[in-house]
Image (spheres, grey):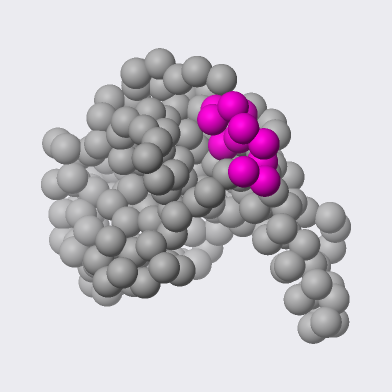
Amino acid sequence: MNLESGEVHVWVLALDSGEQSRDARLAAADARRRFELRRAGLHRVLAGYLGIGPDEVVVDRTCTHCGDPAHGKPRLPGEPLEFSTAATRNIAVVAVASAVRLGVDVEPAGAVDAALEGRLPDSLFTEGEREAVAEGALSAETLWLRKEALSKAIGTGLVAEVATLDIQSASGAWHFHDLPEIHDCRGALAADGPISSVRISEV
């Protein structure tokens, strides 16, 4: 599979097998199953671009900030291919592009608004972001999805800089694309280069 400049491929993998179990052991087993499905899907997608088998794909998760080998931004050593993943209980998505920093987020439609309950706390949003929502420039849900996608593209994670990561000021250097609804979920992409086209496919 080939990627043109500015093109992003978004691959969707269904994860939900039915109602969530209330039994702790069954819930843990379901979480492990979903993790393995997500990992296998990621390796299948990346293998298609690299021209190798899924078992040959090597993903490096070393943190560039502290050197921890387990929690850094995932990348392919020595490859220009950039990717980002996100998951809800229902689906996982893998976004792939070439030679740009890339991040993706996905959440059940309406879940962000339900969690915020109309509030935009200082601990999560900057003054500029709150003003943008108040003025109707974008919804709180869209803002949060872009914010998560940007944090993944940068590789710092939301925990580190959620209160200072400002979508409005980042718009000059970063480009955002809001995904259409997928399996009752909404999502967003962030990249440090123009996004000219987005192709969405099922794994």
Q: Quadrant of residue 57?
A: top right
Q: Is residue 168 above or below residue 175?
A: below
- Name the residue rendered at 26%, 30% in the picture: 193
**Quadrant location of the N terminus in the rendered image:** top right
- Name the residue rendered at 16%, 54% in the picture: 128
In the image, 156: left or right of 103? left
Give how far across and how far down residue 55 sits, in percent.
67, 46
**One can see residue 144 in this view:** no
Magenta-colored stretch includes residue 131: no
Q: Is residue 107 above or below residue 125?
A: above
In the image, 110: left or right of 175? right
Q: Which residues are magenta?
A: 46-56
Q: Quadrant of residue 196?
A: top left
**One can see residue 40 in this view:** yes
In the image, 191: left or right of 90? left
Q: Main secondary structure of the magenta part?
A: helix
Question: Along the line of sight, which residue is nearer the eye, 158 or 129?
Answer: 158
- Name the residue rendered at 27%, 40% in the picture: 137
Give how far across and how far down residue 171 sits, in percent.
19, 39
